[in-house]
C-alpha cells in the first residue's frame, strides 16, 4: 500500500511516474469529467498525457480514503 500512496503523491507533485509503472503496463482510465468515455494508454501515452496535464490542470491531489492489500502466499 505504501507504494501506491507514494505513486499518487508523486503524480500530485507532477513528478514522473516511470519508477512506479512497468514498461508494459496498460492504464485504463474510467470515464470522468475530462474523458467522458474513458481512455486506455500505454506508458508512452501516460507520459504524453502527464505532459499535457501540466498545462491543463493547475493543481491536483489524491486523498486515499480506503485501501485493500493482500499478501501473495507461496504456492505449496
Image (cartoon, helix red, strand yellow):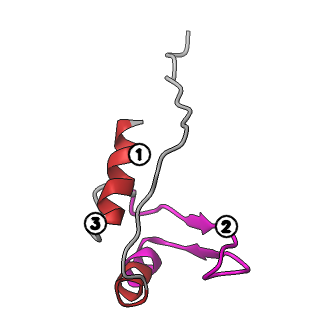
Q: Give SS at disc 1.
A: helix
Closer mark to the observer between disc 3 and disc 1: 3
Residue at 54% in and 65% down: 26
| Residue 17 visible within the image | no
Instruction: Give the residue number, with chain letter if any, for mark 3.
Output: 13
Quarter that holds the N terminus: top left
- Left or right of 16 in this view: 37: right
Residue 32 falls left or right of residue 8 = right
Crowd tier of the residue under label 2, counting other residues whose Cα lies within 10 Å: few below 14, some 14–19, many 20 or above? few
Residue drawn at (41%, 45%), measured in percent from left and top? 4
User: Which of the labelled discs sits on residue 30, or is there none?
Assistant: 2
Give whichever of 68, 19 is nearer the camera. 68
- Foreground label between 3 and 2: 3
User: How many neighbours does mark 1 have within 10 angstroms: few (below 14), some (14-19), or many (20 or more)?
Assistant: few
Say which quarter of the image contains residue 18. Answer: bottom left
- Give the CA separation, mark 2 to mark 1: 18 Å
Q: What stretch is highlighted in magenta?
A: 22-48
Residue identifier under label 1: 4
On screen, 26 above or below 65? Answer: below
Amino acid at each position: 500500500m505504501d507504494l501506491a500512496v507514494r505513486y499518487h503523491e508523486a503524480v500530485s507533485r507532477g513528478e514522473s511516474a516511470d519508477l512506479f509503472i512497468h514498461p508494459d503496463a496498460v492504464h485504463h482510465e474510467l470515464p470522468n469529467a475530462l474523458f467522458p468515455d474513458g481512455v486506455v494508454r500505454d506508458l508512452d501515452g501516460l507520459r504524453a498525457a502527464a505532459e499535457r496535464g501540466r498545462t491543463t490542470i493547475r493543481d491536483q491531489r489524491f486523498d486515499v480514503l480506503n485501501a485493500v492489500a493482500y499478501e501473495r502466499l507461496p504456492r505449496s
